[in-house]
Amino acid sequence: MAKVMLVCGKIASGKSWYCRSLMEKSPALLLSVDEVTDRIFDKALGGDHDAAAARIQAYLLDKAAEAVRAGADVILDWGFWTRASRREAEAFFRDRSVETQWHYIDVPEERWRENIARRNAAVLAGEDPSYYVDQGLLEKLAGLFEEPERDEIAVWVRVRDSGTKQNAQA
């Protein structure tokens, strides 16, 4: 039976890397808000980013349910930063009788900040289409993220300081 895998984690925690590794193990359709905003808006959203991201998420939720009904597994790569966003997504799919599986990328604080620094260097070098995360944005983002409870998550992926990843089932 097809399902939706929802990947939760902070910005630059390794979600996209993890999603690609999931796709290597089993075919799945990857739906990413960042991919849509990068392709369509080319970082030109400014203050409209959050509203556009919410509309994109709603569209991709519908597409995910449609894909599962057609028999395809789906991976949603957009963070699900708050308990409320996770509950809303869970209710959306439950109301449509779509099976879900939550994955969380748990990255230590020091490693997370190193990831941000690497990402920023790549952005400045023109090697990464992502947006630059300055100190103010970094602190804002850190304050917005609500770590999930163990009972919310089926697959807990702990990123070690050394950079290796380890899966742990909740």
Image (cartoon, helix red, strand yellow):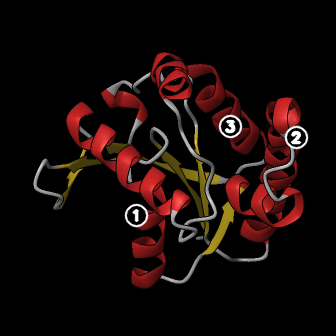
Counting residues from the N terminus, which is met first, the one under dot 3 or under dot 2?
2
For the C terminus, which image quadrant?
top left
Counting residues from the N terminus, which is met first, the one under dot 2 or under dot 1?
1
Residue at the disc numbered 3: 89
Does residue 154 appear in this view? Answer: no
Residue at the disc numbered 1: 18
Which disc is residue 52 wearing?
2
Give residue 94's position: percent from left, percent from top: 69, 40
For the N terminus, which image quadrant?
bottom right
Give residue 97's position: percent from left, percent from top: 72, 49
Secondary structure of residue under mark 1: helix
The image shows a total of numbered marks equal to: 3
Tell me if residue 66 comes above or below residue 104 in the rendering. below
Q: Amino acid at mark 2?
A: Ala
Secondary structure of residue under mark 2: helix
Left or right of 24, for residue 35: right
Disc 3 vs disc 2: which is toward the camera? 2
Disc 1 vs disc 3: which is toward the camera? 1
